[in-house]
Image (tube, rainbow, N blue to C red):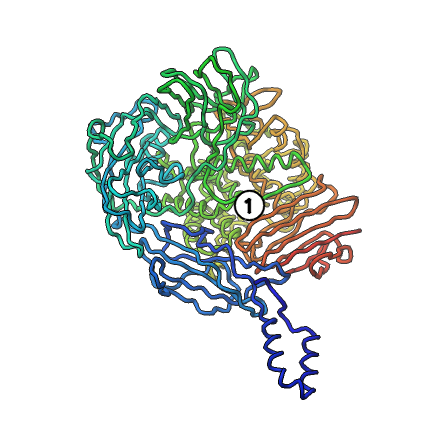
Amino acid sequence: MKPGIRILSLYDCQLCLTAYFRPEMRVLLPMIITLLTGLALAAPAPPRDLSVNEGRINPIGFHDATPSFSWKLDDPRQGAKQSAYQILVTHTGSEHPETLWDSGKVVSDQSVYVPYSGPALTSRQRIAWRVRYWDQESAESDWSTWSHLELGLLENSDWKGSWIHLPKDDFKAPEELGSPVVHLRKSFSIEQVPEMARLYLTAKGIVDFRINGQLVTPDAFVPGWTDYTQKIETLTYDVGPLLRKGENVLAARISDGWYAGTISKRFYGSMPELLAQLELKSPEGKVLELIATDQSWSYSIDGPITMADIWHGEDYDARKELTGWDLPDYPSADRFKPVSTTPIDPKVRLSPKRFQSTRVIESIKPVTLRKFGEGKVIFDLGQNMVGWIHLQLPARKGQTVTIRMAEMLNDDGTLYRGNYRTARSLANYIPAKDGIADYTQTFTFFGFRYVEISGFDQTAEPSLDWVSGEVLHTDFARTGSFDSSHEKLNKLQSNIVWSQRGNFLDIPTDCPQRNERYGWTGDAQVFTPVSLFNYDTHAFLMSYLESIKQEMKPDGGVPNIIPSNQYRGWVNSAGWGDAAFVIPWELYLRTGDIEVLREFYPMMKKRVGYYTNKAKDGIVDEPKSFGDWLQPKSYGTKPVGTDDRSGETSTRLLTTCYYAYGAKLCAQAAEALGKSDEAAKYKALVDEIKTAASNKFFDNDGRVIEGTATQSAYVLPLAFGLIDGELADKATGHLSEKIEEFGNLLNTGFIGTSVLIPTLEKHGLREQALNILFTSDYPSWFYSIVQGATSIWERWNSYTKKDGFGDDSMNSFNHYAYGAVGGFFYEKLAGLAPSANAPGYSEILVAPILDDRVPLDHAEASLITRYGVASNKWEKSNSAWQMETIIPPNTTGRLTLPFKPEEIHVLKGSADFKASGDGSTASVPAGSYHFKITR
Ligand code: BGC
């Protein structure tokens, strides 16, 4: 039922009084009261979008035996709020579900991350849960529908089999590329199809799994990339529908992947391995039969994928297809041999994957094709993307079709591939017969926009439907959008989103195409805030943080790449290792999930502790640093570019900025966790660093006296609070001069750029901020768009129409670090931001820059928060602004507008603006608002 009347109106009260004084009405009074009370308590709609932990919906194979519950109120009224809730958790699977935990009515407005507090849950356990709530007028909702959660195998001891793999004698380490894909099979019979069946699955490497010839899951790159020496992720699949009475076949293909492929230089191991467990269960979940990987499985390496590797691509020889190998009645003895086994290592934790797997999310078609002599054709997909190439084209038996790809074209229209460096990045396909070849890769991925095909049937006329691009990334939900009246700004937003999609493939990577594709911590930390606007990356980032924590050194050192594979000892560049405190704080701020801090505050402290141990009088010297990576122009103190990419900003200054920032974030985290003593300690540390740094790095006039006075040398201290008050004001003046010195353009690298625009805006340099953001001159974001970018580039001049390509040895066209600026679009241009007072959008800050200098007529952003959709949209015509704002139920909004209260007319909703500073503010409850501003 939708919300009805909730309060007794004046008319209702009058009716009661009349009735009371008229004796003939007294009999009817109780009835009237009952009727009115019924109206007064009209039920709000039941809660919706129930989720557990980091927004997971009905997960199976879940990792956490102490889950938390969230729900959304379905109530558009102004002021919609929860005053109490009740959660009911039951066992599922039995006919008469027994209550496991009943929270009872809890007077609280908490509707997100409410911890489960019932009896301990165990591996495989399935629960159902539902919730109801009482609104701001104590009207009670109906119960929500039931949601479900099923735990995976939480302990290593739950796994009954062993790892299976090739016997050592049959394994030949490939000299250059990857190994052939290994096929593993096991046949078994059942008398009856069970009511329920689960496949628990993992691999060292990558696995795809079939039962009776049918693919178990569309998940790609299972299980994912972790530090395989400490933790390997496992997945759970419902496979009941795939089983049949009589003979059944379990069939897996495994490939080197991140584990044994060239990307890890075989650091973790030399060949792939499989661990699987099929459980046939009763409806109550009791395990009736269990089939695990053991010596009864058999293998073949004589299949069609003769080589697969993440960097080098795939070679597929269809003539070698093992037709029927994954089906019953296959004469396996002819071609399959017994596997070897290795016991499960108790020191390596087998743990259910805590976030979404990678999947094909979208398929895109080419927009043009161009034929070349020598039987080549190049397709343009119109978008730099990451994933697979699906071919459906005429080909000849035994004649190799080669698929090469590139992110860009040379002037003559051929592929530019120099920037792939040593990554072979191609696929070969040999058809077994004449006709249409239908092929997509499985165990590799590519970063590309253009696809070149050769070796097809030369009698056929190339056609756009020969090729499609299968876009792969972690399957998180799209949550945010930004739009404006500015074409290039919208294109930039789109490029940021595409680079996020291309580089959030199981871990956050620097780039998806060349021989790197690593989890560079610096790139990830600068991009974290905007990533959380575009998609729900909460669970994805929790997993990455766990990986950082696992690889942190005892002294708080952090590898520059996580997972660090063969680069274990390469640690501690400031801005990179500091992902250990930046990401937890940003994640908490933007999700409100206190578990983030409970789990990772110790890591934040340890990282700051690393600096404290190194600091001398509050200053940290960390010469092994990437500095302000890829600063575009020289300030004249040293050349920048190919030989030295770390820019001219003093690494001592840069490192000390991060030290102060880390201490500040630890103070905030301690406060959020209720550890006021620790918060006070970190605040004192911030003050100590500030005093030391202002004396050491600045003169009394606010000039940088440490190393070269770059733009970043001013921006970082201002952004991270190393200086404040009068000194900060003076430094801001010098920063402004530094920007003027470069023609009112930026001259910052990865680190400085990440905070440049918001810092200029915050410190009163709005005009310069807008100029830098909206210019198309070099170096700028729009510059790359004018040169044709469809994603974010690694360098400001990765390609220019005038001078061609930048230096091949570092030239990615899909590198999201500079995309960090996208946070500003949401927070300041559209004006939708989280609040540190009430993280996770429990309070929403709405403060768009409504200023004639902003070259926009309209901007809007919306975001699906854990409470519901929050949005803000403004439009300008002549000198009047209109603004529409949605504050989701059970949250509040704080609106700040640069106008006098009397200039703001509230057309929808009610809001009481009070003068504040140069403008007005109003605190508003949930609801929809429309404002008109006239001056
Ligand atoms: C990566 C960067 C990374 C950098 C470290 C590069 O090779 O592609 O994105 O942050 O190294 O400086």
Instruction: Locate residue 16, reporting x and y percent.
Output: 67, 80
Q: Residue furthest top?
A: 373
| Frontmost residue, 334 versus 31 | 31
Q: Tell me if I can see residue 664 in this picture.
A: no
Residue sitting at 56 percent across and 69 percent down?
139
Q: Identify the image quadrant of residue 185.
A: top left
Q: Residues within 10 Å of mark 1 (few under 14, many from 20)?
A: many
Figure check: 420 above or below 881: above
Q: Nearer the viewer, residue 620 or 536?
A: 536
Tell whether 216 sits left or right of 794. Answer: left
Q: Is residue 920 visible in the rendered structure shown here?
A: yes
- Residue 162's place in the image compared with 833, above or below, is above
Residue placed furthest toward the bottom: 23
x and y, in percent, of residue 912 in the image = 71, 61
Label 1 CB less than 8 angstroms from ligand 1: no
Q: Amino acid under label 1? A: Phe
- Name the spot of residue 397 as percent of width and height, x first: 37, 16
Q: Nearer the viewer, residue 258 or 640?
A: 258
Quarter of the view holding residue 79:
bottom right
Task: Tell me the quadrant of the picture where the N terminus can be found.
Answer: bottom right
| Residue receiving disc 1 | 533
Identified at 40% across, 16% down, the residue is 396
Front residue of 544/679: it is 544
- Which residue is painted at 32% across and 40% down in the image? 228
Compared with residue 452, is residue 201 higher up or lower down, i.e. above or below? below
Instruction: Assign a secondary structure to mark 1.
Output: helix
Q: In the displayed structure, does residue 579 sit left or right of residue 911?
A: left
Residue 368: give x, y in percent of width and height.
56, 22
